[in-house]
Amino acid sequence: MTYNAGHYDVIVIGAGHAGCEAAVASAKRGAKTLMLTLNLDMVAFMPCNPSIGGPAKGVVVREIDALGGVMGKVIDKTYIQMRLLNTGKGPAVRALRAQADKPLYIQEMKQILENEENLTLRQGMVEKLLIEDGVCKGVITETKAVYYAKSIVITTGTFMRGKVIIGDLAYESGPNNQRASVALSKHLDELGIEMVRFKTGTPPRVNSHTIDYSKTEIQPGDEEPRAFSYETTEFITDQIPCWLTYTNEFTHKIIDENLSLSAMYSGMIKGTGPRYCPSIEDKVVRFHDKPRHQIFLEPEGRNTEEVYVQGLSTSLPEYVQRDMLQTIPGLEKAEIMRAGYAIEYDAVVPTQLWPTLEVKKIPGLFTAGQINGTSGYEEAAGQGLMAGINAAAKALQTEPLILNRAQAYIGVLIDDLITKGTNEPYRLLTSRAEYRLLLRHDNADLRLTEIGYQLGTIKEDRYQKFLEKKRLIEEERKRLERIILKPSEDIQRIMDHTGGTALKEAVKASDLLKRPEINYEMIATVTPAELHLPDDVKEQVEIQTKYQGYIDKSNQQVERMKKMEDKKIPENLDYDDISGIATEARDKLKKVRPLSVGQASRISGVNPSDVSILLVYIEQGKIARVSNE
Amino acid sequence: METDTITAISTPIGEGAIAIVRLSGPEAIAISNTVFKGKNLSSVASHTIQYGKMIDPSTNEVAEEVMVSVMKGPKTFTREDVVEINCHGGLVSVNRVLEIVLSQGARLAEPGEFTKRAFLNGRIDLSQAEAVMDLIRAKTDRAMNVALKQMDGKLSKLIQKLRQELLETVAHVEVNIDYPEYDDVEQMSHEIMIEKTKIVYAEIERLLQLAKQGKILREGLATAIIGRPNVGKSSLMNALVHENKAIVTEIPGTTRDVIEEYVNVRGIPLRLVDTAGIRETEDIVEKIGVERSRQVLKESDLILMVLNYADELTNEDENLFKAIEGLQVIIILNKTDLPKKIDMERVKKIASGFPIVETTLIEEKGIDQLERAISDTFFEGEIETGDLTYVSNVRHIQLLKQALSSLKDAMDGMEAGMPIDLVQIDVTRTWELLGEIIGDTVHESLIDQLFSQFCLGK
């Protein structure tokens, strides 16, 4: 017998990285939000590697922060080490990565959730959606509680019909032996939502006491304090190192000999795995000539001895995992605390979603995170945030938010998913972004804070600080444009020192800064700013000035794209009514139902001639409307 | 999408005395105006026709006499501003005009694009809509088929090879970015990148060079014979005509008549441009100062400069040399049957590397050597006509030029010490542009390359 358990604006099912962002964003926007999760002790749990950020992903964390999300703040309070990657490269590809303290991360996140106004936390397993007239109106749990809401967000990660596989052992389970969500997956299937089967995996965890670190290389964090969140002012200085070791021919021999026992190769696993995160057996098979593979030893936290053996993801039987470890320098005597495993799960084919992450077929229902075929905490969190923002928008009857490919990596991620779909777990890469020079980690606040403020997820005091930063950047840039530097002794000394060619005639300070060997500090020694400028302002002045040529070029590309993006396509366009479109293109268009001509042109199988015809048809419709009036 | 300006030759190719290059779009009038010498086109009344000259902005020389119709939107076929440039018929003139407007920012129209714009801007009524769509479909497909057919299998293979080179380079940089800690993937250095881009750059340059040679083969090599009076210009002409089959064509234009004589030299058609005029003017040295003569020279692909072997170099000779500075020259030392008086050292010095051929034209001696010199100048070694025709499509040439320029940006960036991941943006762009030639623009292949080339996974 079901019972009425209450009415909400938004319900979020799941409390992983997508669910947490979705719930907090929704609540911050003022929607009365309920979060339902299988296990309240496992909020924001990291079932895989203990790290957050990295190239592209780290930028997403910053974007989430600029839009008022929580991932950046939580990791800033709980990291065990932080590094800025790609420092030797251009500003567009620099990215932060933190090693996380897994248990602390959970605690910190749970507190944020518990203290969020408008947000209710409850433990419970959702089995069914309440669908009325094709619209999602609520959820029903296994304990027969019925919760009603205007928007429902599903963020169930890899739990849907989850199956854990170790060698020839397979059992129904979510990650880390949590309960799998079976009824809900079946229910979605019945509702006509198309699903795919994906696979991912983890390596074994070993006891730190049994590792001989003397045989490995130390990988310390950066000396310089760093943070993801623009609000963080306190930094953790007591950092813990990671360690690097390698596999070798003996490891590979064991893998070769036992390959038939790997679930991956025995045919036990049907799901598609990600190419960028292959199992060790995959690496050895595909790149047989490589004499060794890197293995990173990453502590899972300050108060635990468990160490994550990064790079050794596997579905080989437990005893083979033990044999493998024994061949690796430093791990000869390592004791496995948890064995590595592969996990298969159901994911929603993401082309069934609107750019708001609402399911086209079922108004009121949103999906976000790994359930949409992605992989990675950051990808999940980015989607969760957007789904939360848009679920709240729907419930509160305000405008949805869609980020485009030139605004954020989150925009690239969602556009890729809903437009192209994915045939493997999707991971963000810098190469997926056409305008990565614009989507830098250092300017995420400049790109998105304004939007966050409009949404109400960024509060007034932070917004004022942001405006001040923006003002300082603009003024300092203008000043450097004005200042003319003569070839004085001071300047020549700097040029000498940097190995640059001596100045022959007077130049604008901004032009001098464009030389590769010159940085902002050098300019400031000869022409100091009137005010004291914070480091992040100086950084912006330097990057924006130095790479202006490239930034301008990217902006021109964006302008060209924008014309296509601005040509809107009605949601309900009848593609069967358009003669001349090729059959493949028609099928794809009917499935994706793009909202702009730009989006249509990105669908694989839709050719330029199809786009032309589409354009003509849309304009024809406009003319018809005009002539009818 | 309709905010750029498109252009195309809108009269059938190779027919008629007059050809028309049409432009449509917001910049149509401005673009035409920048290369038009005559009335200011932006201030003339709509739907009027203006006489004037078209300037080649790369040389600032007059390229063509033209009549230009200016029609302001919306009362035009496309409802946009439209300019129609009427020029002399014949491939050379009209292509030249087209290239000039392309160089000023107009984009080559796709097949049926004028009609499409006419429709999009509401110029064509609803009943015609279906027909237009069929037209676009048919034209696009046909254009694609034609382009694909035009494209020699060799070109396609070469482009694919170049793209693969670039793709591997780009994938390498991407791996360095996305997997910064992978120590077994070598860091892409400026040195390696420069080396790789240089190879591709040279290949694209060679393709464009071939395209130019192909154009010469199709359209003829504009050749002018110059020299002081009585050095043997007429004999040279006669010898060339006698040795080879001469075809005299008469192309009547609206404002002037041009006589062109074609002679075929070892498979290379020489188009002796307006030589009639020059030959008749015995006082060529004085006349060289006259703009018309100078223009004839500047338009030439090849100058045959005749000197008298049996006479000393004169000021007139030196002045002539100055007038043809920067052009492709072959020096002919005529009258070698007579005792040598010319200062060979001096000739060699002013020839500065251009070939020198000795002839006795009156006896038709030395013509062989001259012909070899011509052939060597434009087609180093063997002529493979198969190679020469394979880049002939204007769209392909445009894309190759853009690809080259984009690669140049990348090389300049490396020169300036820009970070490799920024430079790579231009390399990727080059890869995309080359892809447009063979109709392959799928971005996914980069990611596929990434995972097949490197063992990744953290």
Image: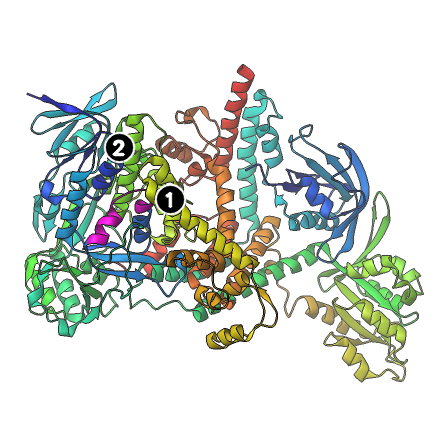
**Chain letter of the residue beneath label 1 in the structure image:** A
Instruction: Specify the segment rendered in magenta.
Output: A64-77
Q: Is residue A194 visible to the viewer in this orientation of the structure?
A: no
* Mark number displayed over residue A592: none
**Above-or-below relation of A577 to A27:** above
Question: Residue at the spot x=13%, y=63% of the render?
Answer: A257
**Quadrant of the image containing the N terminus of chain A:** top left
- Total marks drawn? 2
Q: Residues within 10 Å of mark 2 (few under 14, many from 20)?
A: many
Where residue A300 sits, quadrant-wise, is bottom left
Q: Is residue A600 left or right of residue B399?
A: left
Q: Is residue A76 magenta?
A: yes
Colouring style: rainbow
Question: At label 1, which amino acid type do we have?
Answer: Gln
Secondary structure found at label 2: strand
Q: Earlier in the sequence, mark 2 or mark 1?
A: 2
Q: Are marks 2 and 1 in contact (CB under 8 Å)?
A: no
Residue at which label 1 appears:
A464
Pick the residue in front: B46 or B110: B46
Question: Residue at the spot x=76%, y=40% of the render?
Answer: B41
Determine the main secondary structure of the stretch shown in magenta.
helix
**Above-or-below relation of A360 to A209:** above
Where residue B144 sits, quadrant-wise, is top right
Question: Residue at the spot x=69%, y=39% of the render?
Answer: B10
Residue at which label 2 appears:
A366
Q: Is residue A500 left or right of residue B89?
A: left
Q: Is residue B327 magenta?
A: no
Q: Position of residue A311 (x, y in %)?
A: 20, 60
Q: Residues within 10 Å of mark 1 (few under 14, many from 20)?
A: few
Q: Position of residue B419 (x, y in %)?
A: 44, 63
